[in-house]
Structure formats: structure tokens, C-alpha cells
Amino acid sequence: MKRILGIAILATLMACNQAEKKSTENTDSLQQDSSLVSNITIKDEKKSNILKQYIDLKNALVSSDADAAQKSATVLETSLANYEGCEPTAEIAAKIASTSDLVTQRKNFTVLSADVIALLKNTDIEAGTIYVQHCPMANKGDGGDWLSTEKEIRNPYYGNEMLECGRVAEEINGK
């Protein structure tokens, strides 16, 4: 009996250590995604800032951090409001900033992403690649897209539940 109890405790400790290791790997990947924004050169500085702030919001959702998502969405809202034609998109960012409910934030992120993707598809990227990624299971099976500065999938719609669910749907390349 003692032997079985000892094995159970050991297995639990090993599982906990693996979870901590995986969590560290996810954090490293998110930091890498943020740093890769600097490898992308967009001619329009306002669009470049929008992309950086959008990536910060996406990373907060990947980490399932509603507070960080609120803060990132607030900053993004200001940048979008100051970009002519993006006022409706700024309102969506404001909706994300106004709630601490991850489900609501992620639902609004779908609409926000569609608008930001459209904005960046029609921009002069001087260097680097922006990836349009897609999760077919997001939004109750309707699917959802998002932008990333790396090819590796880090799903903002499910976070750690389904971190790698998705595929690269398109690449927006520098000219």
C-alpha cells in the first residue's frame, strides 16, 4: 500500500513539474512573438504600432490573462481611434477593454482581428512576414482568424486548452 501511495505521489509531482515546464515554454514563445514584431518593417508607423499592440492583445488572450487583455485593448483602442477609418474597430477594442470575461473578450477579438487583418493586407510591408492564422473550432465551430508574427500556432481563442489548434491560412509578405 505504501508503495502504491509513493508511486502516486511521485507521478503527481512529475506531472506538476511538466506543467510548469510547459507554462515556461509558452511564455517564452509569447515573448518571442512580441519581439518578432520588430523584425517586421511597415512603412506606415501608425500601422506598425497597431500591429504591435494587436500582438500584445493576442498574447494576453493566448495566456488567458483577462486583465492584460483589457490593458492591451485599451492601448490598441487609442491607436485605432487615431487612425482614420478605424473608428469602428476602436469601438470593438473598447468592448474588449471594458470586460474581464475571457469568453466575451475572445468573441470580440474575432471581429477585431478581421478588421485588423483587412487593414494590414493593404499596407506596405518593407520587411518580414505577418501570418494570418485560422482556428476552425473557434466561435462554436464558425472559426476565427488572427495575426501572428511567427509561423508557430498559439491560439488566442482557447489559450492552454488548445494552444496549437489552427493553421497558417495566409502570409502577408514584405515587398
Image: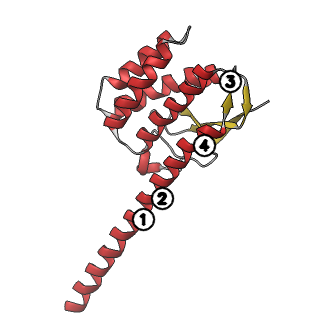
Q: Quadrant of the C terminus?
A: top right
Name the image quarter holding residue 127: top right
Q: Judge whether 3 appears above or below 63 on screen.
A: below
Label of residue 69 in the image: none
Task: Give how far across and how far down residue 45 sits, in percent.
Answer: 61, 22
> Which label's residue is closer to the chain start, 2 or 4?
2
**What secondary structure is found at the residue carrying circle 2?**
helix
The answer to whether one can see residue 142 in this image is: no
Write the residue at 59% across / 38% down. Answer: 37
> Which label's residue is closer to the chain start, 4 or 1?
1
Mark pair 3, 2: CA separation:
30 Å
Residue 93 vs residue 111, the one in the foreground: 93
**What secondary structure is found at the residue carrying circle 3?**
helix
**Tag count in the figure?**
4
Task: Give how far across and how far down residue 118 sits, in percent.
Answer: 62, 21
Question: In the rendered image, which residue does mark 2 sit on?
Answer: 25
Indicate which label's residue lies in the foreground, 4 or 1. 4
Label of residue 36 in the image: 4
Question: In the rendered image, which residue does mark 1 sit on?
Answer: 21
Question: In the rendered image, which residue does mark 3 sit on?
Answer: 121
